[in-house]
Image: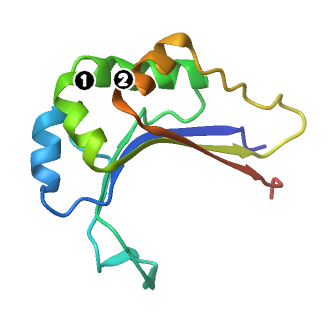
Amino acid sequence: MTKNKIHLSFCIWDFEDITHDKITELIGRNPSKIYNKGEARNKEFPLRITKTNGWILDSTADKSIPFEEQMDSLLDILESRKELLKPICNKYYCEFSLALYIYSDEESTPSVHLSSRYHALAKELSFEFDLDLYCLQNA
């Protein structure tokens, strides 16, 4: 049986006057994924073209750990660089992107609790929160 998965990322979108490398330098972490405007979004589907540049930082490789732990790991990184992130978040579209993959009704649906720590940083940096829920059947 496939276990439920939680995929949390911090994303910076829609920039053209700064490079992916400069964002990496400012944040001090290598991105999990980058998107280049005009290129194929996914090599398996080359007709889907990326409309904007994107810089994505995933919370962890282990998608089965609780949401709160994943969020805390990203907040640790972002809070330590918030002064560098302010101009980025003010100029470009920034968001936390959460995808919940629900495979089984035998396992409880993962909880999503946004702490006061999250809200304080969201207020200061003005980023969005996007939640996608996928209810899938085990094969």
Q: Give residue 38's quadrant in the image.
A: bottom left
Q: Give residue 112's quadrant in the image.
A: top right
Viewer-nearest residue: 49 or 58: 49
Please tell me which residue is depicted at 42% across the width and 32% down the height of the picture: 60
The answer to whether the residue labelled 1 contacts the one labelled 2, judged by CB atoms less than 8 Å apart, is yes
Please tell me which residue is depicted at 23% across the width and 32% down the height of the picture: 85
Where residue 137 sits in the image (x, y, percent)?
A: 83, 55
In which quadrant will I find the N terminus? top right
Instruction: Compare marks 1 and 2 and give the one earlier in the sequence.
Output: 1
Where residue 102 sits in the image (x, y, percent)?
A: 76, 44
Q: Which residue has dot 1 on it?
A: 82
Q: Secondary structure at mark 1?
A: helix
In which quadrant will I find the C terminus? bottom right
Q: Residues within 10 Å of mark 1 (few under 14, many from 20)?
A: some
Give amino acid for label 2: Glu
Give amino acid for label 1: Lys
Q: Residues within 10 Å of mark 2 (few under 14, many from 20)?
A: some
Where residue 133 sits in the image (x, y, percent)?
A: 71, 48
- Left or right: 9 as drawn, with respect to 111: left
Q: Secondary structure at mark 2?
A: helix
Which disc number belongs to residue 36? none
Colouring method of the image: rainbow
Q: Nearer the viewer, mark 1 or mark 2?
A: 2
Which disc number belongs to residue 124? 2
Please tell me which residue is depicted at 44% across the width and 16% down the height of the picture: 120
